[in-house]
Each structure stands twice: as C-alpha cells, then as structure tokens.
Image (tube, helix red, strand yellow):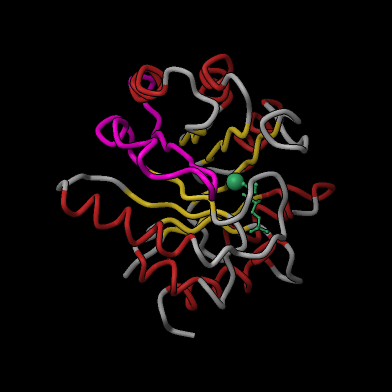
Amino acid sequence: MTVSLSASILSADLSNLREEVARAQEGGVDSIHVDVMDGHFVPNLSFGLPVVRALRRTTDLPIEAHLMIELPERYADRFVEAGADVIYFHVESASRPISLSTSLRSAGVKVGVALNPGTPLSTIEELLDSVDRILVMTVEPGFGGQRFIEGTLRKISKLRRLIENGGLNLEIAVDGGINCSNASKVVEAGAAVLIAGSAIFGREDPAEAARLLRSCAEGRA
Ligand code: DX5
Ligand code: ZN
C-alpha cells in the first residue's frame, strides 16, 4: 500500500525553513502541510498567507493549507492565490461547506474537509460528493507533539466502509500524533495520507525521519 506523506512545518526550525523543507523533500515526502490557526477556532496562533507565499517560492512540492479558523469562507480563496494546492477546512466552522468546496474545486485545488476527534461522521454525510479528502483529526487541533487518540482508529475504519459502500472516490487523511508506532495501524484502518509534524521535523534529520516513517507506514519497519 503506497501512502502519501505530508510534512507539517509546525514542528520545523522556522529560522531555517528552506533547509528544513529541502531535507523533508529529500526524504521523499509528498507535500508540505501548513497549519493555519486563528486563536479562536483553536487556542493557538500560527501561520498565515505570507508563510504559504514564502514556501511557494521555496519548494515545488504541493502545499497543503489546513485552515483551523473561524470563517474559512472568508480566507480560503486567498490561500489558493498564495499558492496552496490543497485546502482543508473544518466542518465545525464552515457555514456553507458545499459551496465553499465547489468554489475551491473550480479554482483548481483539492479540497479536504476536516473533523475534530469529537465530531461524528454524520456531520459530513452530505459533503461526501463535494470533496476530495476527509481529514480525520487524530488529536485535538491546535498544537503539535500531542499523543495520538487511539479511539480515532474506529472512526477511520468506519469512514473507509462508508466510502467503499458508497463507491466513492475519496481519500482519508489523518493528522496528529502520527509516528512509527501507529502509522501502519492508521493505514490498515484506511488512511492514505499521513500528516506528521514532530515525527519528521522534531528529529535530528528530517530526511531520515521521513524515510523511516514511510517504512513504518508501509509495514516495512
Ligand atoms: C495539529 C496540526 C497538525 C500538527 C501535527 O493541530 O493540525 O498538523 O502539526 O503535529 P504532530 O505530528 O506533531 O502531532
Ligand atoms: Zn494540520
């Protein structure tokens, strides 16, 4: 099973971002993940548009913007303009998720809808035809380096069954606490896109860490 790995820069050495991203790229990651936090939807502040623009000049890898913000409808287009290739918004904060997704897709980006650990799958039932990915949060959003919530494995499997039974063309992504000890479990449960911050950038050599994480995810380590 081939997995897609996305490296979350929340845990990177930001004083050396260009080099950090280059190391992750050398380690074979498939995309760079940017956590956008507004201090309202989540109790933390992080990056915004200038960081996405700067990354766009730094790498040719796809850039994912994970919008952990209120009013995603107000800002999503600007992240596309800034150079994002994938936009994740949260079902908990989007007031018109179907029209948001439709307009983003017509702008040429991939769209993922994200759910917090406590948000049931029933909240996205009506969105399954309108998005490309479902992002199952495997920690409470807001901070890097948290512990993976085991109970989310059940949710991933349930979502996989829903996708299979519906004959839908949807990828499952997971974000939060992903490391070598749980990577193969989330893949077995149905995840195809693994987002990892501290397991890649929290290590001495992000390239080596990315290679190791991939072999764990693909059951080779
Ligand atoms: C958490 C963020 C994650 C975070 C993951 O709110 O959405 O992308 O960077 O970090 P780790 O892999 O350290 O849990
Ligand atoms: Zn994220």
Q: Residue furthest bottom?
A: 221
Q: Residue furthest right?
A: 15
Q: Is residue 60 visible to us here?
A: yes
Where does residue 182 sit, x and y in percent of width and height? 52, 73
Where does residue 68 sit, x and y in percent of width and height? 62, 34
Q: In the picture, residue 154 is in which quadrant?
A: bottom left
Where does residue 181 sit, x and y in percent of width and height? 56, 78
Report the span colored magenta.
106-133
Magenta includes 219?
Answer: no
Q: In the picture, residue 189 is in which quadrant?
A: bottom left
Where does residue 37 sit, x and y in percent of width and height? 69, 34
Q: Nearer the viewer, residue 211 or 189?
A: 189
> Which residue does the image show at 50% across and 64% down from the upper left?
151
Q: Is residue 89 visible to us here?
A: no
Q: Is residue 108 left or right of residue 168?
A: right
Magenta includes 131?
Answer: yes
> Which residue does the image show at 80% across and 47% down from the upper left?
14
> Which residue does the image show at 75% across and 48% down from the upper left?
17
Q: Nearer the viewer, residue 214 or 59?
A: 214
